[in-house]
Image: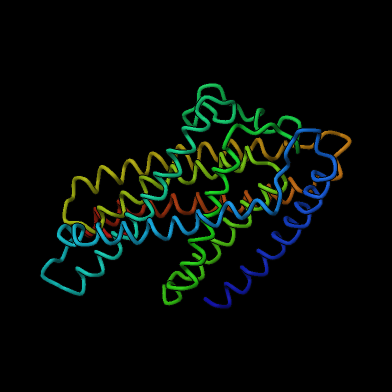
Amino acid sequence: MNRVFNYVWVALSCILLPYFYFTARIYLYGQKNAPQGYRYPRISDLWVMLPGVVAFAVIQRVVLYFATPLIRKWVKSQDDPELCAKYTKKSCESFVKLTFYLILCSWTNYILKETDWLPWYCGGKFGSFDALNENMPFTETPLYAYECFLMFLALYVYQLIDLLTSGLDRPDFNEMLCHHICAVSCTLCAIYSNTLGTGILVAYIHALSDIPVNTSRIFASMKYVTPMLVSYFMMLAGWIWLRIGCLGYILYRLWGRRFSADLSRFDPFFTVECLFSTVLYGLHIHWLRLILLMILHYKKTGATTDL
């Protein structure tokens, strides 16, 4: 397995290094050529993220403090202390993530729902994909959308720090490390290439689909079958619509995205971004297969835990 991940890290480096390189070129151009009165994202803006990282750490501890004794009463295997503790921990971790995603999705929807940055297929009224890319890289940003996206970055950074400080013994450590590094890298590149519209929409879709995912994981550790089945089919529907349908459409449009003719020297940025996004989209299809296997596993064994 370690050998496999050595190849994964090499492949990631081959994509992320040119991704950051072209982001840096666009960033330098944006700083020098921003129209008068236009505020291009700055590296110094990252300080806004730091209170968010602290806030997510506090929220996690508060949620665990209050939720753990309650969830412990509802999980399976009450007569087995070891299994009970395992299910309690698993369910509480999902409850924390559910809280994070509910906060971020509520804020994002509140900020974008009346703007042209949230398309109808994500719950918006006036949005379209074209509006996300007008006058790149100097697209007009809705009020507080940039700050909201920085909070997504704060969450990804906090999850990476939490993994490196308390998750070293996790069996899926390498997978999660790849996931968090990709999330942080994609967000940073979206910010400093000033493709914020696409970045925040993709982050919103991921967080929105993770709400039923973590709800299902909570009930999978409990002794109540009906809520587990209901949440499972909500997860399946959300995954197909958001991760496969919405992200698939966005990826299709990304392949045709280009800068204006006078900035065509920056177009390789989109090529690298699309290659990276296509690989990640393939993982969403793979995860859909695993989600479908869950119900077959349940039908065969009656087990409600994750595969």
Is the residue 39 above or below the residue 43 in the image?
above
Q: How is the image coloured?
A: rainbow
Q: Position of residue 95 (x, y in %)?
A: 32, 54
The outermost residue toward the right is: 262
Q: Nearer the viewer, residue 237 or 298?
A: 237
Is the residue 133 above or below the residue 174 in the image?
above
- Residue at x 61%, y 43% (from the top left corner): 199
Q: Quadrant of residue 157?
A: bottom right
> How many numbered circles are shown?
0
Q: Nearer the viewer, residue 274 or 135?
A: 135
Q: Quadrant of residue 303?
A: bottom left
- Residue at x 34%, y 56% (from the top left corner): 94
- Residue at x 75%, y 51% (from the top left corner): 23
Q: Position of residue 307 (x, y in %)?
A: 34, 61
Q: Nearer the viewer, residue 303 or 103?
A: 103
- Residue at x 46%, y 75% (from the top left corner): 168
Q: Position of residue 240 (x, y in %)?
A: 44, 40
Report the side of 168 relative to 137 (left or right): left
Is the residue 280 above or below the residue 144 in the image?
below
Q: Nearer the viewer, residue 298 or 129?
A: 129
The outermost residue toward the left is: 79
Q: Position of residue 302 (x, y in %)?
A: 20, 57
